[in-house]
Image: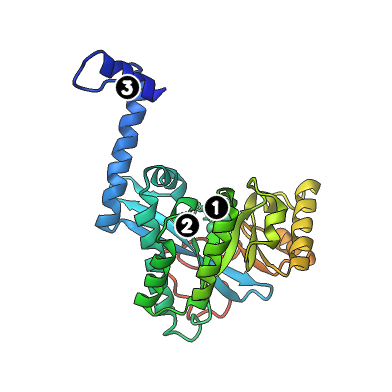
């Protein structure tokens, strides 16, 4: 529709592009403004990683997920879902994603200097567009080499959309990355379009049960059944499972009872800009976003 309007405006022989629908024009203008600001955000250092703890069945911290935040000078903290779709459309996700991997590796290296942080894994979200870049493997390798971080501590979170394109080339690329020492988690598992058959072909270390299934796990029999099935299947495939979006002890208990031994969610800590878990052996309050 936008293209049609653009064409008509051009055909009308005007030198400035105008859109006939003022609402449409406004939307496009604000999108362009956001894109310009996002482009500058990276250069101005307005992007930041927050960290959310992941814990095991004993309440011990086993790792963290790095979650991107945009600290906009006027608009404050912008959550990723408000700018990552645009970043993906415009291709800005490539330099942004590169920055995320680089920053995560530097963080891992810093953790290595501390006895209680040293064994933590750091999970990083990788968008499909980023993963499919020809030099993605080389970029991860460079980030690891530059930081001298232990590759075994880096976990890449992929979504099912990554596999939609060309499963064979995705698998090959995953093996190249595994050869570097990194591991893989399938994020938002169960929400995508993929079939179960690829599960045994993909070199995955972990499945992450999407929070939409966890939310009503104790009240909705369908969600409970889906989660049980995911856990049973993963067990027989030898893939570890982590549940995201765990907010209550009831949810955690249900998951534990059904053989899920890793958790992430507000119950254990919100994403936080500061990772200083040194003083605490297990989960506890941290200075997090509300
Ligand atoms: P995700 O990877 O599935 O991350 C989990 C999201 O659930 C995060 O939202 C997290 O803050 C939120 N969450 C954690 N615990 C709970 C809970 O107990 N209850 C509820 N309701 N939510 C919880 P966030 O940080 O807003 O990130 C949203 C999405 O943005 C992420 O979903 C991921 O898809 C994307 N994203 C974040 N950082 C990056 C990044 O560096 N690169 C890329 N490509 N995508 C990213
Ligand atoms: Mg994730
Ligand atoms: Mg997720
Ligand atoms: Mg999600």
Task: Tell me: 162 left or right of 148.
Answer: right
Q: Earlier in the sequence, mark 3 or mark 2?
A: 3
Q: How crowded is mark 3: few (under 14 residues within 10 Å), some or many (20 or more)?
A: some
Q: Which of marks 3 and 1 is nearer the N terminus?
A: 3
Q: How crowded is mark 2: few (under 14 residues within 10 Å), some or many (20 or more)?
A: some
For the residue pair 138 and 154, the one nearer the viewer reads as 138
Q: Do the residues labelled 3 and 2 touch (CB within 8 Å)?
A: no
Picture coordinates of residue 156, whole percent (x, y): 52, 64
Q: Do the residues labelled 2 and 1 touch (CB within 8 Å)?
A: yes
Picture coordinates of residue 57, whole percent (x, y): 69, 73
Q: Residues within 10 Å of mark 1 (few under 14, many from 20)?
A: some
Picture coordinates of residue 97, whole percent (x, y): 40, 58
Q: Is mark 2 on a helix, strand or loop?
A: helix
Report which residue position mark 2 lands on. 131
Task: Tell me: 218 left or right of 126.
Answer: right
Report which residue position mark 1 lands on. 162
Task: Tell me: 212 left or right of 156.
Answer: right
């Amino acid at each position: 529709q936008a293209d049609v309007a653009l064409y008509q405006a051009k055909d009308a022989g005007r030198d400035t592009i105008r859109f006939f629908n003022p609402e449409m024009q406004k939307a496009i203008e604000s999108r362009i403004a956001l894109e310009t600001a996002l482009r500058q955000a990276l250069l101005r250092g307005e992007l930041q990683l927050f960290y959310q703890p992941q814990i095991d069945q004993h309440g011990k911290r086993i790792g963290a997920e790095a979650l991107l935040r945009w600290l906009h000078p006027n608009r404050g903290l912008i959550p990723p879902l408000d700018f990552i779709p645009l970043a993906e459309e415009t291709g800005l996700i490539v330099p942004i994603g590169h920055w995320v991997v680089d920053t995560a590796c530097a963080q891992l290296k810093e953790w290595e200097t501390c006895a209680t942080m040293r064994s933590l894994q750091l999970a990083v979200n990788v968008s499909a567009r980023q993963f499919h870049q020809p030099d993605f493997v080389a970029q991860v390798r460079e980030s690891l080499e530059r930081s001298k971080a232990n590759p075994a501590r880096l976990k890449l979170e992929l979504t099912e959309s990554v596999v939609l394109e060309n499963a064979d080339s995705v698998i090959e690329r995953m093996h190249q990355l595994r050869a570097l020492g990194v591991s893989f988690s399938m994020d938002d598992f169960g929400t995508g379009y993929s079939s179960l058959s690829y599960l045994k072909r993909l070199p995955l270390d972990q499945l992450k049960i999407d929070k939409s299934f966890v939310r009503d796990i104790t009240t909705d029999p369908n969600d409970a059944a889906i989660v049980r099935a995911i856990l049973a299947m993963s067990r027989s495939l030898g893939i570890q499972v982590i549940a995201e979006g765990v907010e209550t002890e009831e949810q955690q208990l249900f998951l534990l009872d059904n053989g899920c031994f890793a958790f992430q969610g507000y119950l254990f800590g919100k994403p936080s800009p500061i990772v200083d878990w040194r003083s605490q052996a297990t989960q506890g309050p941290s200075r997090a976003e509300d």
